[in-house]
Image (tube, rainbow, N blue to C red):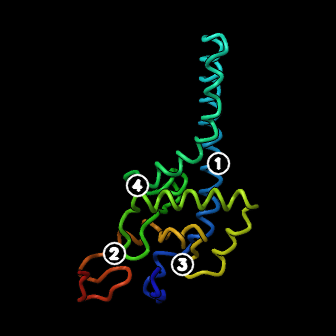
Amino acid sequence: MSDFQPGPDESFFIQGVMWRRCVAWVVDAVLIALLVWVLWWILAMVGVLTLGLGFALMPILALVPFAYQMLSLLGSGTATPGQAMLGLTVRRDEDLGPPTGLQALISTLGYYVTLATSGLLLLVALFTTRHRTLHDLVSGLVVVRTRGMRALTAPAGGWNMPAGTSAR
């Protein structure tokens, strides 16, 4: 984890992220519900057509939310469709690069463990720098506004490095 403290010049990255994440969660929940509903009907038809043998595939419905989030983080937009719709993107905290596969896995697992334990641990975002949730902290990711990503230019320095320095 980085010990970098946000300054006033990086507010364009994190301004409004909290409420956008909440609305994005609702959008994603609706999209996941639609995906599960469509997949349920497909699997039901397969079950009927195979005289009941296809019903054994129904447990894969439980993997839809996990796959939705994991594949979204690894996709080109590095955000779920709800996050992308609200101008958010998920990035590595140290350099704002796209998440690695391991980071996406840890973040997704951490998110669903948090939800399974009442979801109250999501309140950590109210008290952390850059409004990072527990699964963001553990995975080394941060949710930022895409507007801030466009404003970041190489000559001006990076997320955690002042201008004129380079990473080795």
Give the alpha-carbon distance from disc 3 to disc 4, as whole Å. Answer: 20 Å
The three-letter code of the residue at mark 3 reads Arg
Mark toward the viewer: 2 or 1: 1
Disc nearer the start of the sequence (2/1): 1
Q: Which residue is mark 1?
A: 29
Dividing the picture into quarters, in which one does residue 154 lie?
bottom left
* First in residue order: circle 3 vs circle 4: 4
Could you say which disc has been placed on residue 77 in the image?
4
As helix, strand or loop, the secondary structure at mark 1 comes to: helix
Mark 4 element type = loop
- Residue position for label 2: 152
What kind of element bears circle 2? Answer: loop
Cα distance between the residues tagged 4 and 1: 18 Å
Residue with the most extreme right position = 118
| Mark sitting earlier along the chain (2/4) | 4
Say which residue label 3 marks. Answer: 130
